[in-house]
Image: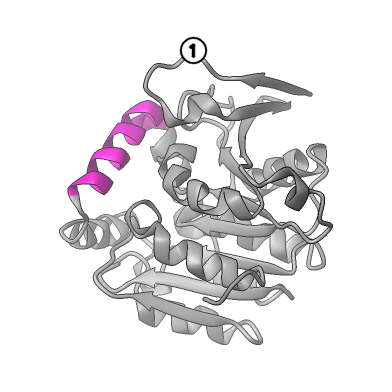
Amino acid sequence: MSRRRFLFGRRNSPLDRLTAHEFQFGDAHVRVYEEWTMRPELAESPDVPTFVLVHGLGVSSRYFVPLAGELSPYGRVLLFDLPGFDDLPKPKHRMSIVDFADVVKRALDELDVVDPLLVGHSMGAQVVAEILAQYPAYSSAAMLVGPVVAADGRSRLGVALRFLQGALHEPPGNALAATMAYCRAGVRWIGDTMPKVIAYPIERRLAETRARLLLVGGEFDRVSPPAWHEQLAAAVIGARMITIPGAAHGLVHDRYPELADELLGLAGIGTA
């Protein structure tokens, strides 16, 4: 089930100008915002990429708005709100990473997306990894930004301590955007989802992928440190990793120009 509408109801939201697609699969509601500012003559090209942006635990599509703006002149950009996050209703059951991956894939199928460039941040990286593992031929390239959770920190206490250590290096804009998103999602739903995130074996699932993989992290990201990226990259043939100096876990929000450059290079547009 799909509904397409323009959003004019929310004041002062950068998403107001975008087209929203809404789907319901069982009791899981998912929303996909679409941004595409490419010139019409370029949009007819068969090689125009589709960038799919999947957010992390507690946040939403809003966290990706700056990055989407950088990418939209070069292709179709789809920003996801996963079930239970932002203002979407909470499903009656606790959703696993496999469940989130299923609704993302079904929504992309509804939108006739072919060979997208998948981008996942934090928990969203797990969702992307699961799609790549289940459908190895679906996407030829993907970027995982701050993929969680490092194998030596898979406990609530370990994640919390590392998150706080990294938060000391986050700029105020990242902290404010994340805090507002956490309030919209609610403590209960974040708490219900966190054990699924902690338990997800991303290193084993990535071993199933055939996509060209780029792992990106921040120098001061303690939840997803560079050493963890090296371990993940070793599990995937041809995988590359990049560490952005001075950045922390929320780098998709404040270091979007660097990410956009790398994504365009991954898509074969310009040079990373």
In magenta segment, residue 183: yes
Residue 126: image location, x then y, percent: 56, 58
Camera-nearest residue between 155 and 221: 221
- Asked if residue 211 is positioned above or below residue 46 in the image, the reply reads below
Residue drawn at (59%, 50%) of the image: 73
Residue drawn at (74%, 47%) of the image: 105
Residue 83: image location, x then y, percent: 57, 33
Residue 149: image location, x then y, percent: 43, 64
Q: Quadrant of residue 136?
A: bottom right
Amino acid type, label 1: Gly
Q: Is residue 72 left or right of residue 123?
A: right
- Asked if residue 177 is positioned above or below residue 216 in the image, the reply reads above
Residue 57: tell me if it is visible. Answer: no
Camera-nearest residue between 8 and 239: 8
Residue 47: image location, x then y, percent: 79, 61
Tell me the colour scheme of the image.
Answer: one colour
- Asked if residue 178 is positioned above or below residue 20 in the image, the reply reads below
Q: Disc 1 designates what residue? A: 9
Residue farthest toward the left in the current orientation of the protein = 168
Q: Quadrant of the N terminus?
A: top right
Camera-nearest residue between 36 and 177: 36
The boundaries of the magenta stretch are 172-188
Residue drawn at (33%, 64%) of the image: 223
In magenta segment, residue 127: no
The secondary structure that most of the magenta stretch takes on is helix
Residue 176: tell me if it is visible. Answer: yes
Q: Is residue 223 left or right of residue 50?
A: left
Residue drawn at (61%, 74%) of the image: 213
Q: Secondary structure at mark 1?
A: loop
Residue farthest toward the top in the current orientation of the protein = 9
